[in-house]
Image (spheres, grey):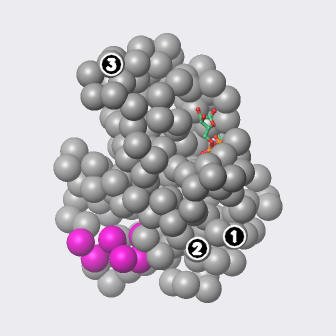
Amino acid sequence: MSSFRFPNGVTVELIKGDITEIEADAIVNAANSYLEHGGGVAGTIVRKGGWVIQEESREWVRKYGPVPVGGVAVTSAGRLKAKYVIHAVGPRCDIEPIEKLDDAVTNSLRKAEELNLTSIAFPAISTGIFGCPYEDAARVMVRTIRRESPGLKNVRRIIICLYDDEAFNVFDRVFSDEL
Ligand code: AR6
């Protein structure tokens, strides 16, 4: 684990592991625009949290339409330890610029603020099925977090949960470099 602290007391922790096991007020899901949670983090969230997360997601899409790239939607977290799942749609790197990840992270943090949450855990959005390199995603995430952190009032703890050694090592190097 690595941890970084901003002057206003917000901490960023890099943790290796499974995001569904993390105790945070919200976990962020790496979702698609239709909130159909098949594989990757999304599939695990629904398997472990329960089908209610998929049902609430479909309800959201029926009500508001598909979530745009960079946008977010919120559901309960079913049986997971978190209170909410914030479903964030990252870019698909074969057709969209990695910079759209900035919007996905910004909107997730702002949604957590709006919900009065103190902690939020992110996976490495877009670096699995959506094909973005760890290095590029880490650069965007760290810069977004650095820019947004001074404005956070409720969120005190930001966790980035990396699934394997390779992802952890790249994120650790990039975050150490930039923070
Ligand atoms: N905990 C933490 N990280 C994980 C976990 C886990 N349990 N499982 C995988 N990862 P992905 P994307 C890592 O594919 O690229 C889904 O089908 C994984 O190693 O989940 O944004 C959605 O429904 C990778 O580094 O998300 C969308 O259709 C990172 O999480 C699409 O995939 C993201 O991988 C979204 O693709």
Who's the residue at 20% across and 65% down the image? 153
Q: Quadrant of the N terminus?
A: bottom right
**Residue 104 placement, left or right of 131:** left
| Viewer can see residue 27 | no
Distance from mark 3 CB to nearest ligand 1 atom below 8 Å: no
Q: Residue furthest right?
A: 166
Which residue carries the number 3 mark? 62
> Residue 136 appears in which quarter of the rendering?
bottom right
Q: Are marks 2 and 3 in contact (CB under 8 Å)?
A: no
Instruction: Name the amino acid, label 3.
Output: Arg
Who's the residue at 47% across and 28% down the image? 34
> Between 135 and 13, which is closer to the camera in this rendering?
135
Q: Position of residue 14 (x, y in %)?
A: 58, 63
Q: Residues within 10 Å of mark 3 (few under 14, many from 20)?
A: few
Q: Residue furthest front?
A: 95
Instruction: Name the amino acid, label 1.
Output: Glu
> Residue 87 appears in which quarter of the rendering?
top left
Closer mark to the observer between disc 2 and disc 3: 3
> Between 172 and 74, which is closer to the camera in this rendering?
74
Q: Magenta segment range?
A: 145-151
Who's the residue at 76% across and 53% down the image? 164
**Residue 127 placement, left or right of 75:** right
Closer mark to the observer between disc 1 and disc 3: 3
Give the CA distance from mark 1 to mark 3: 35 Å
Q: Position of residue 168 (x, y in %)?
A: 71, 62
> Residue 10 appears in which quarter of the rendering?
bottom left
Identify the disc placed on residue 135. Answer: 1
Give the CA distance from mark 1 to mark 2: 6 Å
Q: Are marks 1 and 2 in contact (CB under 8 Å)?
A: yes
Which residue carries the number 2 mark? 139
Give the CA distance from mark 2 to mark 3: 34 Å
Q: Please, is residue 166 above or below residue 75 in the view?
A: below
